[in-house]
Image (cartoon, rainbow, N blue to C red):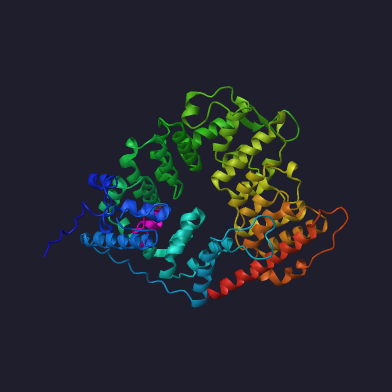
Amino acid sequence: MPQTTRPTATTIGATTPASRSASASPPASAGHLPWEDLVTSALLGTDRRPPAVHGTGSADAPAVLLDAAALHTVRRRAGLLPAVPEARPEPAAPDPRPALPEAARHRLAHLLADRSTPSGGGRRGTAPDLTELIPQWLAIANRRGFRAPAALLPPLLDAARARTDLRPQALAFAGPRGRWLAGLNPDWKFALRDSARGTPQDALTDPDTVARLWEEGLFAERVALLDAVRAQDPPAALALLATTWPTERAEDRLMFLDSLRSGLGDADEPFLEQALSDRSRNVRATAAELLSALLASALAGRMAARALSCVHPDRTGDAASIAVEAPHECDAGMQRDGIVAVPPTGRGERSWWLGQLVEAAPLGVWEVRFGGRPAEEIVALPVADDWADELHTAWCRAAARQRNPRWSRALLGRPSEPVASGPGTASIAERSKLLAVLDEGERASWVAGFIAAHGLSEAFQLLGVCTVPWTGPLGRAVVDALDIARDGGSYPWSFSGVMGLAERCLDPAEADRLEVLTAAQDEREGASPGAGGYWSEAFQRLVSTLRLRAAMEAELMT
């Protein structure tokens, strides 16, 4: 009985020199046709490229090809070597949080499945945008302390991979099992780096583990570690940063220094004072900004002295006013304390230097300098020589940096005042920063008054700093302004951004009250073509979204 030779890994599925030369030799048997020839015949068809086998006609060529492929496949499989088994991964850490209610689980599956559906261009119709509801659903589920269903972790991590805005809430909801799963798939490695929650809490209490992670981790992992340690023990985070500070790259030092904003305190002053001499201008500027927020710091005192020498009561007239004498130079001491010497294009040097000095000075010094007057009276004083805009804008930046509600309130003024003639600044961006200093209720009340007086054309940024869901007065002010815009024949597309905010931020309890606005209106003379239909669709979508949000909240009730 003839012996057969067992195929080896070097002869199976590979094209050797001998096999390549076989195509030039007499036709082989079906069992020894090179795999490349079989693939070529299959792609081109046996009519154009019949198998090179003696005695093969056009009728039996397809059968010969299939037989040869089957035989070749058996030979390849017979030559495979058994794989070496890998060690099983350690099990995920337990997650003690309660499971989702069944209705909420189905809702999450629907939201995650819908996120990949492409949205059509043009008009959005009346259906809610489910992709915009995922962040709200996750926020509610995290507040109620539920854990993510294991079967939905892969689509949840895929969603967080595609949308960075989802990551904090998604990773918190995914919990330890989500981080464990992310460690098994390189596509989800962001989950191990993007959040301080990726650092186990027990690891933060072990100095050796923290030191190892700090020295060996990737940059994003080190930032997350520093943030986590800072939130738990600010002095320990500062000490950790000091161990490697001289050897860090300039761009890394800047990011690490930014982590000190959380829990900033007087104990950080010595480190920040040393950073004022850093070789990076951006690092020096950030250190100066942080020091100026420490009102008792030496830098704040130096800035106050400089600013007071420039701004003082004007004693030349009968009525109280403010006189300004801007700096004539930016010396080395000012530059070391963070004053940028070269102004942007279009700005004068002296006004540029003055604004930086006033911004960095503690606001309390002005109440003393102006005879104990409160902030409201100081910002109302006339300013000589057209320095009012520069001075008030610098005070606005100081109030936002120092988180001073009294000065923020004074610089905002009454919401009904014309934007251009307010006591502080006409910049909506600056007003948004001042509003962020106030408590939630006062913030919402001020924005509601602003919308009632000025409409929605300049209110988009202001609405962005208000707490969700909007309070009743704020929500009613927004809806009333939208209704007025509709009745006035305004272009509806100009308010699509505000309408989108309303879908996410209005209290779901407002849905029934808004039902009356969903009816289509007759086209009015002078109105934008098609505006009535668009407004009707927009309000129908708003009502549908609010009711869907109400259903989501009810499903997540325990």
Q: Can you give x and y, in whole percent of width and height, for residue 377 in the image?
A: 69, 43
At 60% from the left and 69% from the top, the residue drawn is: 549
Q: How many marks?
A: 0
Q: Can you give x and y, in whole percent of width and height, for residue 472 in the image?
A: 68, 65
In this rendering, position of residue 410 left or right of residue 525: left
Front position in the image: 77 or 494: 77
From this viewpoint, which residue is outermost toward the left? 1
Prevailing secondary structure class for the magenta stretch in the rendered image? helix
At 32% from the left and 56% from the top, the residue drawn is: 204
Q: Can you give x and y, in whole percent of width and height, for residue 129 in the image?
A: 61, 62
Front position in the image: 356 or 374: 356
188 in the magenta segment: yes
At 42% from the left and 63% from the top, the residue drawn is: 154
From this viewpoint, which residue is outermost toward the right? 525
Position of the N terminus by quadrant? bottom left
Q: Can you give x and y, in whole percent of width and height, for residue 140 in the image?
A: 52, 67
In this rendering, position of residue 230 left or right of residue 512: left
Front position in the image: 24 or 6: 24
312 in the magenta segment: no
Q: Is residue 558 visible?
A: no
Q: Quadrant of residue 306?
A: top right
Q: Is residue 174 visible?
A: yes
Q: Quadrant of residue 183?
A: bottom left
Residue bounds of the magenta highlight: 181-199
